[in-house]
Amino acid sequence: MKFVTQKALSRRTMLRGLGAAVGLPLLDSMIPALRAAPAPVRRAAFLYTPNGIIMKDWTPATDGADFEFSPTLKPIEPFRDRILVLSGLEHHNGEALGDGPGDHARAGASWLTGVHPKKTEGADIHNAVTVDQILAKAIGRETSLPSLELGLENVGIAGGCDSGYSCAYSNTISWGSPTTPIPYETNPRAVFERLFGDGETTDPAARAVQSREDRSLLDFVLADANRISRSLGAADRSKMSDYLDAVREIERRIHQAEMKNAAAPALPALDRPDGIPPTFEEHIQLMFDLITVAFQADVTRVVTLMYSREGGNRTYPQIGVSEAHHGLSHHQNDPAKMALLQLIDHHHVEMFSYFLGKLTATKDGAGTLLDHSTVVYGSSLSDSNRHLHYNLPAVIAGGANFRGGRHLRYEKGTPMTNLYVSLLDGFGVRPEKIGDSTGELGYLTDVG
């Protein structure tokens, strides 16, 4: 903005000020004396693993509370009391229904919608609003980011990707409207900057220095603007008054951030990443670290993360799998290929376990982040060799909206969307219908 003196007030000064008020977790010192602690904040994460699963190594042999964790699910056994394994759910609308091939595209598009996407490679794509975005619209107004969409594989692909289906259906699992897919972010550095501004770290001491610099810049802006105001006409003085009110609002927010930091610097030190790490393991663990801190700081309460896009051909040399994932998923019942695919399935669950460990280790009010979160992990294909959209792999983890420690098996034909209706209900969100839902899913909170 320029004034009559031709001096400029840097817009960057304003942006730095706006980014200074970083949210912090709920601290005991923030709760006034003699006032009851507020109800814990609730969060949700949806984690998608593509290209189906070797189901014989995924599904527990027995049902109920005494089930044994299967070979693939063994890494999450330490969280048994916070785990529900669900069998028998399906996405009927992921099937061909007369549209022929394209199961990978339909799988990604239907996982959080339960609808059959329009088969097209053009601009006339059509799906539905996803569950994460329904939830974000309801609870995301209280955070600076209503939702966060993350992925681990480059999706700079346009046009057709799967037998006449647009790449848009494979490149994301989040849709803001039936015609608006939401692209995910793969670069941890960009995620950090989106969450915490352009600082170099979440370390409290470093952020305190940044806050003092912001305050010093604002003091300069206020002094300069006040001096300029004396030489302005009445109309410009009115505009300047509005401008100064805005600057003082930024000053107030900086002061609030300083007070919170003085009370208790609660965020762990996390440096701004350099970019995308060289290995899958480093990449996903860094993303999970960022999600954990974002939940802890209450920057967002809704996250989706894709391990890779449907039809993705990542290799996993760290676990001895040099063959491409999607290629292995069409194993033709070859035992050697199935064994390699099971290694990938198991490794993906290991990364899921890493995330659950981070949430468990992070205190949140009277409990932990895992206590106050609902995490959905799964795929929209079961047997990828046959492109099956029924008896889907699904796990819920956390301490909100359900009772863990069980393997629940549902009747054939039970829509996966019934699970989403139940989970949203636990957040106080009650859409009339989600995709092909027929009601809430039974037994989540009681003995089944």
Image (cartoon, rainbow, N blue to C red):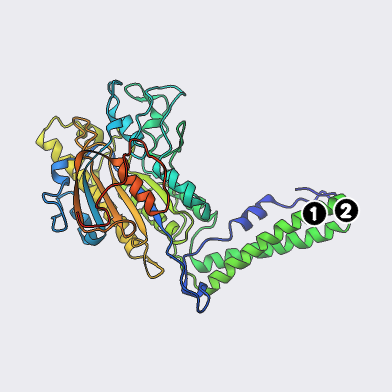
User: For this rendering, which residue is in front, 381 or 403?
Assistant: 403
Dot 1: what SS? helix
Q: Residue at x 50, y 53 (%)?
A: 195
Dot 1, crowdedness within 10 Å: few (<14), some or many (≥20)? some
Q: Which residue is mark 2?
A: 232
Dot 2, crowdedness within 10 Å: few (<14), some or many (≥20)? some
x and y percentages locating residue 104 in the rendered image: 29, 31
Three-letter amino acid code of the residue under disc 1: Met
Q: Quadrant of residue 49?
A: top left
Q: Which residue is mark 1?
A: 240
Three-letter amino acid code of the residue under disc 2: Leu
Q: Residue at x 23, y 61 (%)?
A: 81
The label on residue 177 is none
x and y percentages locating residue 7 in the rendered image: 79, 51
Residue 178 can be seen, yes or no = yes
Residue 187 can be seen, yes or no = no
Q: Earlier in the sequence, mark 1 or mark 2?
A: 2
**Alpha carbon separation for disc pair 1 and 2:** 9 Å
Q: Is residue 385 above or below residue 4?
A: above
Horizontal side, residue 92 vs residue 40: left or right: left
x and y percentages locating residue 298 in the rendered image: 47, 59
Dot 2: what SS? loop
x and y percentages locating residue 299 in the rendered image: 49, 56
Horizontal side, residue 11 vs residue 177: left or right: right
Q: Residue at x 43, y 26 (%)?
A: 125
Q: Quadrant of residue 258?
A: bottom right
